[in-house]
Image (cartoon, rainbow, N blue to C red):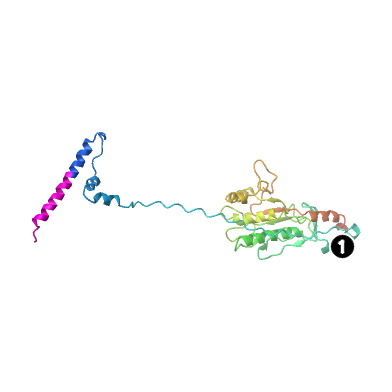
Amino acid sequence: MRSVPPRALGSAIVIVAAASIAVFAAQRGARSSPNEGASAAPVTSARRMGALPGVASVLASTPNDTPQAASPPPPPPAPARCMPEPAIEVRVVDPPPVTELFRLAKEKPEALGSASVGSPTRGSLFGGVELKDSEGILRAGGYGWGTELVIRSIERAVREVRRCFADSPRLYVGDIARERGGWLKPHRSHQSGLDADIGYYYKSQATWYQRATAENLDAARTWALVRALIEGGNVEMIFIDVSVQRLLQAYVATLPEGEQPPEEVFPSPTKRDTIIRHAWGHATHFHVRFRDPAAVALGQRLANILPRLRGARRAPR
């Protein structure tokens, strides 16, 4: 074993002694300082280490290893409202004089267009258009005739939903009216081509007359459908069970302020004469009462002609 030179050993002893004296002085100063109270904290090991050459600078330069909490990411921007479908352009014909009106109704009815005669609960339909199965519509009712405006309004709303929501399933549409209108069992209305039973959109495979619930209703697509019908400008009333109304209102409440519907859409405790109204039996589908002033005006002109015309067309026994 190599021996330590006496000179080096003496230097080490001097350094250790100096460090011990510095620590002792620091402890004594902490106890006797007039600026500290009786409960002054004892000198910590870090202060003792700081008395040694280079230790204080090392402690001061030690980085803070405490992990900083990450700030939450900003919320995603609200999706932009899908552009609505173009408005419907339906041919409007000025009714001719009675004699010419009778001739056209008998020989060339397509020249007059659709006519809604009487009322939805006691009426008939002239020149109706039939709703057909399509890429977005699946007929569920046996009678799908209505005024041209009614049929085009349903088709327009379904097109908007399918354009705004990819992979949308086909929508069930029930009864509208008979080809010539009149009483349609089991409905009280559906007589003049202005009423339509329309299904809801569902999250999974749907069937006609399926009850809508919080678990299966596709509120986003259903609201887009209802909104498209209303914004088409041809809807008078929509009958929806109050349980389904609540589901739609809960969804609408999550939309940006600019997409909130006006007050006249949903009923409230102080407002009942709204577009959407409660009707028992409409948790499986909703009922739309359309407004078609041109067809109603033509129906008023034809009201006295059609009984004679249809009597003349009736085959003799």
Amino acid on which the number 1 mark rests in the picture? Leu
Q: Looking at the rendering, in which quadrant would you find the C terminus?
A: bottom right
- Highlighted range, magenta: 1-21
Q: State left or right for residue 100 relative to residue 165.
A: right
Q: State left or right for residue 38 relative to residue 293.
A: left
Percent position (x, y) of residue 94? 84, 58
Residue nearest the observer in this picture, 190 or 162 = 162
Magenta highlight on residue 182: no
Residue nearest the observer in this picture, 231 or 222 = 231
From the image, tell me which residue sits under label 1.
104
| Residue 30 can be seen, yes or no | yes
The main secondary structure of the magenta stretch is helix
| Residue 177 can be seen, yes or no | no
Q: Which residue is found at the position 16% from the left and 46% from the top? A: 20
Q: What secondary structure is found at the residue carrying circle 1?
A: helix
Magenta highlight on residue 9: yes
Picture quarter containing residue 104?
Answer: bottom right
Residue nearest the observer in this picture, 234 or 212 = 234
Q: State left or right for residue 250 relative to residue 101.
A: left
10 Å crowding of disc 1: few (<14), some (14-19), many (20+)? some
Q: Is residue 43 above or below residue 167?
A: above
